Amino acid sequence: MGDKCNLCPRNCAVERCDKKGYCNMGESLFVSRAALHMWEEPCISGERGSGTVFFSGCNLGCIYCQNHRISKGETGIEISVEKLVRIYHSLENMGAHNINLVTGSHFIKKIAESVEIAKKQGIKIPFIYNTSSYEKAESLKMLDGLIDIYLPDFKYYDEKTSRNYSNAPDYTIVAKKAIEEMVRQCPRVEFDDDTMLQKGVIIRHMLIPGHVYEGKKIMKYLWETYGDNVLYSIMSQYTPVKEFENYPNLSRGVRKKEYDSLVDFCLELGMENAYIQEGDCAKESFIPDFDELKIPEE
């Protein structure tokens, strides 16, 4: 008998040594891709790229997920914690500005172990925890002192939206507590001389087509809560992955007037430390190719 998993807000209590949890993953560590990634915020990707590690599985499971193949656990290879640490070193040797850990909440214990080992072995570049924010604050405490930069999403504000799109009516309550813990751990934004982020929190909101009003509520809450203590990223890159019969708004991209309305609102709030996306950002270039597993050679 193994431990029942309650690492994330799903509290599915599955013994993942025997079967998969809500996250579509068992106990073993699976990685779908590890490579240099050029499409994060400029202070993350820089000129050489972010050393991005995509973990298989996901505890949120948005119906419009752009990375649905990995979120459903359909791709990936099983690796050990030791192999994961070697991947970190490989990415650093390739010139990565940082190590970017994407959607790893269901592996958070092993991630904490791997980062601790890597730092003891002398890795110098920052570690980033890239998350949907559907995280338990108490689980995030495992990463205290290990993660240098948090890159959380704030996806929804209205319970109906989070229920319909992610089967998570408690998303907003959970995300608020999770981001509060992230900011507690990384309370100050720090850059190096080359304008690359070394410490801090960047809170992302990807505008969902037809949800400008909700996006404004999110940005207002964030600004009133955190002000200039964090950075913000207002994203327009939503990419439809299929036709949605019940939610036709999800079958299209974000309209320019929708995105401009949200950005103008943020400027009216007084928000100046925000990244915005200009032009046609809803392109497949933002979606890594998971058809070919890409893991650095040792």
Image (spheres, grey):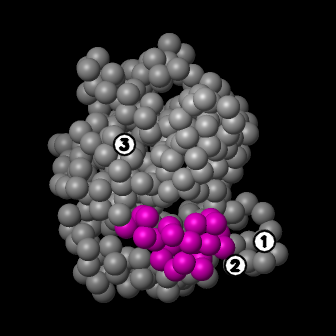
Disc 2 crowd rating (10 Å Cα; few below 14, some 14-19, many 20+) is some
Disc 1 crowd rating (10 Å Cα; few below 14, some 14-19, many 20+) is some
- Measure how far apart labels 3 and 1 are at the Cα level: 33 Å
The boundaries of the magenta stretch are 156-176
Residue 201 percent coordinates (x, y): 30, 55
Closer to the camera in the image, 114 or 191 = 114
Residue 291 percent coordinates (x, y): 73, 36
Please state which amino acid type lies under the numbered disc 3. Answer: Ile
Where is mark 1, residue-wise? Answer: 244
* Residue at the extreme front: 1
162 inside magenta stretch: yes
Please state which amino acid type lies under the numbered disc 2. Answer: Asn
Q: Is residue 208 above or below residue 191?
A: below
Residue at disc 2, secondary structure: helix
Give the residue drawn at x 68%, y 51%. 68
The N terminus lies in quadrant: top right
Residue 229 percent coordinates (x, y): 20, 64
Where is mark 2, residue-wise? Answer: 249
Q: Is residue 176 above or below residue 189?
A: below
Quadrant of residue 247 within the rendered picture? bottom right
Where is mark 3, residue-wise? Answer: 128
Residue at disc 1, secondary structure: loop
Quadrant of residue 154 within the rendered picture? bottom left
From the viewer's perspective, tell me whether residue 230 is left or right of residue 24.
left
Residue at disc 3, secondary structure: strand
18 inside magenta stretch: no
Q: Main secondary structure of the magenta part?
A: helix
From the viewer's perspective, tell me whether residue 22 is left or right of residue 272.
right
Q: In the rendered structure, which disc, 3 or 2, sits on the residue that comes first in sequence?
A: 3
Q: Is residue 44 above or below residue 272?
A: above
- Measure how far apart labels 2 and 1 are at the Cα level: 8 Å
